[in-house]
Image: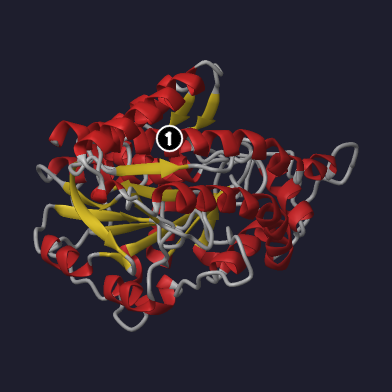
């Protein structure tokens, strides 16, 4: 019998059963973490051979003969620029290779816009109460960048095809709206890939602000889980029809390809943006870690090598995603206790509760020893207006830990729902 068909007494009995399960689960003293999208140890093992690439090798020279042990080559090694160019499908001269973190590159770019302006316009910090569009649910690190700089955030709901473009068109009529954060392929946390029509609509935007910029955070560009991956239209190809190439700056990294915190990041942009960004980077650093760039190129070689490497990741991750999806289907579907995404790639599954508070689910999980991403973190200022979204990160736990963690999650959703339903009767 489904919850909707139960009498108040039957619901109360179901709640007692769930509370008994909850008490038993607490006795296990679990300490499981599904809070961040971190690769598991078995994924990190896939890249260990990279550390052997230049150890004990006297020749640490790039393809053009440059000695990677020394200063110089601010834009990155030519072969590393070529590698990212192939992945992002842009010319190598439109790529700058950075340090370990694409988040750092994004933060720096926003800082440059705030203090020096962009495209010849006045610094954002001197233009008044500037605003940014944030797609929701979205990536909490994008939101914290905005909070750090005091940028007001305007939420736009995601659809199955990407963000609500009609609402974006209205918002960009305000000259104080200076940009938007986008994760266009396997968005964080929904796992949605923008449709071709959505990509073209974003390329066709005519913002009132001449210095409007789209932060195209293509973090999961090669992170497919199966043999029928999503396809993302190349944003710079879409821009050609509208002459809007200067409006987009694309970012990516190898953080979830090789080693998080010890990978290589990159940005791609129009030549005008590249010149401006390079000039400012020259004030900040002499060069990034070219030895690390060299290791990565020797190990990954080219885009085909990256895709082959990512198939090894997929072999580890796909079963983990399936464990979560099977549990949600088994435990939550019958009583319509939640709705969730079934992504073809990326690092997350997005769960929306339908009959209870997501915050309450998070509290119950924590009491049972499972840490989730802070409920609300997928919305600006940490506030989910509907109190429904939970970001599930299946990658870090072992298979056995994950099975137990998702069991806890489903129990928490059931108990929170029954608590809510028994309050109402």
Q: Residues within 10 Å of mark 1 (few under 14, many from 20)?
A: many
Q: Which residue is mark 1?
A: 411
Please state the horizontal and vertical placement of residue 307, each as a whole percent of the image. Answer: 68, 63
**Tag 1, which secondary structure?**
helix
Q: Is residue 136 above or below residue 237?
A: above
Q: Is residue 75 visible?
A: no
Residue at 55% x, 21% y is: 30
- Give 217 or 122, whichever is nearer the viewer: 217
- Give 356 or 198, whichever is nearer the viewer: 356
Residue at 22% x, 68% y is: 165
- In the rendered image, the quadrant that contains the C terminus is top left
Left or right, 167 with reference to 238: left
Left or right, 332 with reference to 51: left
Q: How many numbered discs sit on the rendered protein?
A: 1
Q: Is residue 244 above or below residue 332?
A: below
Q: Is residue 367 visible?
A: yes
Question: Image quarter for residue 297?
Answer: bottom right
Q: Is residue 358 above or below residue 369?
A: below
Please state the horizontal and vertical placement of residue 25, each as a whole percent of the image. Answer: 50, 23
- Give 423 or 65, whichever is nearer the viewer: 423
Residue at 15% x, 64% y is: 167
């Amino acid at each position: 019998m489904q919850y909707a068909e139960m009498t108040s007494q039957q619901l109360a009995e179901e709640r007692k059963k769930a509370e008994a399960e909850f008490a038993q689960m607490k006795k296990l003293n679990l300490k499981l973490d599904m809070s961040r999208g971190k690769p598991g140890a078995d994924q990190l093992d896939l890249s260990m051979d990279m550390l052997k690439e230049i150890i004990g090798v006297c020749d640490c020279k790039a393809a053009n003969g440059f000695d990677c042990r020394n200063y110089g080559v601010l834009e990155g090694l030519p072969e590393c620029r070529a590698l990212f160019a192939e992945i992002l499908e842009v010319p190598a001269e439109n790529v700058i290779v950075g340090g370990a973190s694409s988040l750092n590159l994004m933060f720096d770019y926003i800082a440059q816009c705030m203090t020096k302006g962009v495209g010849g316009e006045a610094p954002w910090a001197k233009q008044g109460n500037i605003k940014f569009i944030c797609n929701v649910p979205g990536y909490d690190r994008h939101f914290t960048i905005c909070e750090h700089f005091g940028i007001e955030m305007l939420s736009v709901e995601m659809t199955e095809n990407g963000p609500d473009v009609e609402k974006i068109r209205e918002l960009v009529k305000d000259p104080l709206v200076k940009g938007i954060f986008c994760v266009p392929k396997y968005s964080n946390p929904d796992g949605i890939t923008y449709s071709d029509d959505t990509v073209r609509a974003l390329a066709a935007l005519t913002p009132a602000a001449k210095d409007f910029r789209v932060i195209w955070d293509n973090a999961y560009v090669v992170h497919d889980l199966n043999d029928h991956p999503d396809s993302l239209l190349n944003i710079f190809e879409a821009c050609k029809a509208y002459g809007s190439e200067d409006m987009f700056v694309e970012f990516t990294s190898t953080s979830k390809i090789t080693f998080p915190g010890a990978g290589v990041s990159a940005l791609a942009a129009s030549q005008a943006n590249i010149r401006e960004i390079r000039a400012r980077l020259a004030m900040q650093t002499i060069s990034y870690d070219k030895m690390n760039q060299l290791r990565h190129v020797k190990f990954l070689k080219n885009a085909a090598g990256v895709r082959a490497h990512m198939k090894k990741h997929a072999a580890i991750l796909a079963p983990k995603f399936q464990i979560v999806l099977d549990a949600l289907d088994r435990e939550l579907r019958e009583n319509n206790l939640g709705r969730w995404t079934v992504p073809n790639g990326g690092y997350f599954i997005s769960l929306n509760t339908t009959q209870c508070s997501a915050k309450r689910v998070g509290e119950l999980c924590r009491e049972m020893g499972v840490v989730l991403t802070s409920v609300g973190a997928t919305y600006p200022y940490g506030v989910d207006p509907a109190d429904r979204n939970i970001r599930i990160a299946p990658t870090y736990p072992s298979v056995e830990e994950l099975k137990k963690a998702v069991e806890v999650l489903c129990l928490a959703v059931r108990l929170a729902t029954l608590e809510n339903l028994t309050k109402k009767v």
